[in-house]
Image (cartoon, rainbow, N blue to C red):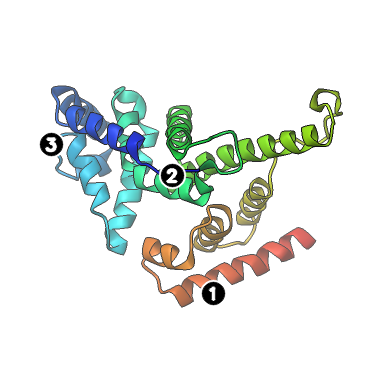
Amino acid sequence: MSPPTLRPIDQLAADWHARSRSPDSREALARLARAEAVVSSLGANDLGDVVASLGRSRQADSRCSAAKVLQAMIRSQGVHPLIPRAILQAVMPGLVVAAKRLSWGSGGDWQEPGPFLSDVVTTAWEVIVEWAGQDRDYAVLDLLSAVRCRLRRQLLRQRSARQRLALGVDPDRLRRPQWAPDTTDLDELARAVNRAVQHDLDSFDAAVLYGNRVLGLTIAELARLTGRSPRHVVGRRDEAVRKLVAETCV
């Protein structure tokens, strides 16, 4: 596989540059601001300003505010058709990270990183549109997780099918297992975390475990994301693991 190219990202960035300052963008922001106070408080002129402000979030407080804005955008994206496009542009850096963590599609049917990255973006768009009207506390993490898991399942199915063919087994003649054929260990962990939260697992601990074990974010990345020290993040993750094991053993 050739070195990764970000050409699809560059093309989307150019498209967004042309659309983000348009009258349509200003109208979209006006509608979104009327529906969501957290967006209205930004004082932005158009969706281009909103996305730019989200990209500048570095400190813990500003990252928390940015997460609330994206949560609001997903929840109220139905007020204007340009808002889903703004959400996609806002999460683009996270999509590149997801593509890297999936080794740019290596081991799948993708021969070049470019087409795989295009599929990452397409999958993200599908998830964003599907989630219109939903209110998600961890909107960004959930979105990136959904994209990564969908593509990871696709990779696993492709590898499994090739392995069966290499062994001379006809995939169409195999009996389907009783469990969902596209379930992965990541899906099971996410479900287990959600079950534990319903009992006594702290929501911050769950988010740390979810980000580290499901999304594959490093401790350093989670520390920057949450504004906590790496030692604190490790401690909360380990506590979440302890409670999760206790929950599953009951």
- Say what amino acid the circle numbered 3 marks: Asn
Q: Pick out the residue farthest to the front.
A: 2
Return the residue at label 3. Answer: 45
The numbered mark at residue 139 is 2
> What's the residue at 58%, 42% (across, down)?
149
Residue 181 visible in the picture: no
Q: Position of residue 31 (x, y in %)?
A: 23, 27
Rendered view: 170 above or below 114: above
Rendered view: 191 above or below 133: below
Residue 100 visible in the picture: yes
Return the residue at label 1. Answer: 235
Number of labelled discs? 3
Q: Position of residue 64 (x, y in %)?
A: 33, 56
Mark 2: give few (<14), some (14-19) or many (20+) Cα within 10 Å. Answer: many
Considering the image in quadrants, where does the C terminus appear?
A: bottom right
Mark 1: give few (<14), some (14-19) or many (20+) Cα within 10 Å. Answer: some
Q: CA distance from mark 3 to mark 1?
A: 42 Å
- Say what amino acid the circle numbered 2 marks: Ala
